[in-house]
Image (cartoon, rainbow, N blue to C red):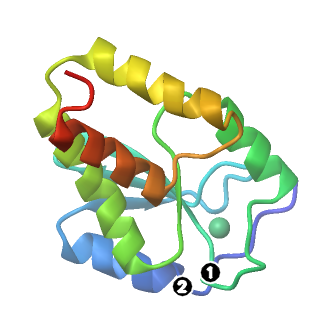
Amino acid sequence: MRAKAVDRNQAEIVGHLRGAGATVQDLSGVGGGCPDLLVGFRGRNFLLEIKTPDPESKLNALQNEWHMAWTGHAAVVRTPEEALQEILAVRVIGRAKRNEDKIADWADRLLEDRPHRKLTKSWLRRLVEGIRNGDWR
Ligand SMILES: [Mg+2]
């Protein structure tokens, strides 16, 4: 399998993640649809697929298959801000989490509405808003 080309914004994003205190392992040579980066931050692991901000920069078929099948954390990020929000947002959820089953049910209902949606920033934002608003209590 051909190794993926490294996204041109990868070095910048890695620099910002490390600047925030994260540890970063480059996985962009793994292939098979695996995301570009393994990121450690405050006791958690994150898998980040880097895409450039260009509208035509999307997951290819192999990456899409990988993301649909993976049951752990994985996200697509296009800017340093998105990468930082991704690792910080999960921390917010973790801190606010009081009833995992209810959060999971609530997230399931969201996912049922749009079964092919990915874990996007807006999805996370809505999840965090829901937790803060007490929608799941
Ligand atoms: Mg990439």
Q: Residue at x 68, y 33 (%)?
A: 115
- 98 vs 21: above or below: above
Q: Quadrant of residue 96?
A: top left
Say which residue label 2 marks: 9
Q: Residues within 10 Å of mark 1 (few under 14, many from 20)?
A: some
Left/right of residue 93 with respect to residue 83 in the rendered view: left
- From the image, state whether disc 1 or disc 2 is nearer to you: 1
Q: Image quarter for residue 5?
A: bottom right
Question: Residue 129, can we see it?
Answer: yes
Residue 4: percent from left, percent from top: 75, 67
In the image shown, does 124 or 71 lie closer to the viewer? 124
> What amino acid type is highlighted by mark number 1?
Thr
Residue holding disc 1: 52
Circle 1 sits in a helix, a strand or a loop, which is it?
Answer: loop
Which residue is drawn at the image coordinates 30% and 67% (left, top)? Answer: 84
Q: Residues within 10 Å of mark 2 (few under 14, many from 20)?
A: some
CA separation in Å, label 1 and label 2:
6 Å
The x, y position of residue 62, in whole percent, is 82, 48
- Give how far across and how far down residue 70 sits, in percent: 61, 32
Mark 2 C-beta to ligand 1 under 8 Å = no
First in sequence: mark 1 vs mark 2: 2
Image quarter hosting the C terminus: top left
Q: Nearer the viewer, residue 64 or 28?
A: 64
The image quadrant where one finds ligand 1 is bottom right
Q: Which element type, helix, strand or loop, lies under badge 2?
A: loop
Asked whether disc 1 touches disc 2, contact meaning CB atoms under 8 Å apart, the reply is: yes
Q: Position of residue 113 (x, y in %)?
A: 62, 33
What residue sits 63% from the left and 79% below the top?
7
